[in-house]
Amino acid sequence: DGAISPNLERGLGGQPDVKIYRPELDPESLEKKLNEKAKDRRLPMEEHAQIQMMLAGFDVANQRYDMALARNLELADYFGNAGQRHQQAIVLNNIGDLHYTQNKFREAQTWYERAINISVGLKSEPLVMYQSYNLGNALLMQNRFADALIYYDAMEQLARASNLPMQQIQALEQMGTANHRMGKSAEAGEFWEKAVELSRGLKFEEGQR
């Protein structure tokens, strides 16, 4: 009948005022809420694991690497025991990232290798491609250039087969870098030239540079 509740005052244009709810979405508030929720023993284990993964991300962002490592080790055990191999491979890769961020390249290599072994067994091309790149980088930082090339080459082939030119450019760039550091300038130039050609076709300026 068009009647307005007496509890609502008229706002602009004669319309009822609107109550606005502003949730706390800043990182600190969100992390606090997640920590509180993680303490709830009634939570299903799967949901608890997802919360721990998010909290590990906050730990990394705040450089609390020991806490992030502890969470990820717990998650790796959980997903392994639960038979969730895909998630386990992701977490093992995350542990590798933690070590890589701290310049612990040998340790990073070990965890990337564990991750990629699972991903290969799962025949998950996206995971194998991503983890091959990470493993290649860990080997490159140890000056193990020939070994790094094996994984960059695997990434490049998977990216080409999957029609993912941006990832292919990344792999080609690193293949050039590895060859250049081995003193193989001609080979390095060939890989970089391929990367430039792909970048030019995509109008990808950073790749062209």
Image: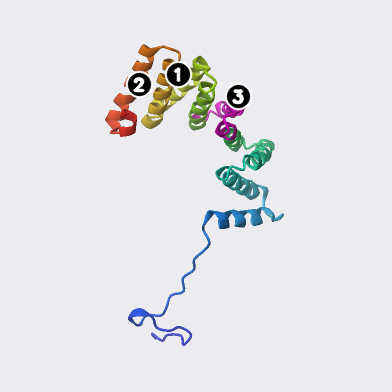
Stretch in magenta: 96-125
Q: Residue at the location (65% across, 57% down)? A: 36
Q: What amino acid does circle 1 point to? A: Ala
- Give residue 38's position: percent from left, percent from top: 66, 53
Say which quarter of the image contains residue 196: top left
Q: Which residue is mark 1?
A: 178
In-image side of 146 versus 102 (left or right): left
Q: Is residue 18 above or below residue 1?
A: above
Say which quarter of the image contains residue 193: top left
Q: Label 2's element? A: helix
Q: Which residue is mark 3?
A: 106
Q: What amino acid does circle 3 point to? A: Arg
- Give residue 184's position: percent from left, percent from top: 41, 12
- Give residue 168's position: percent from left, percent from top: 39, 27
Say which quarter of the image contains residue 122: top right
Number of other residues with Cα within 10 Å of mark 3, as a class: few under 14, some 14 to 19, many 20 or more: some
Magenta segment includes 116 = yes
Q: Label 1's element? A: helix
Q: CA distance from mark 2 to mark 1?
A: 11 Å
Magenta segment includes 197 = no
Q: CA distance from mark 3 to mark 1?
A: 17 Å
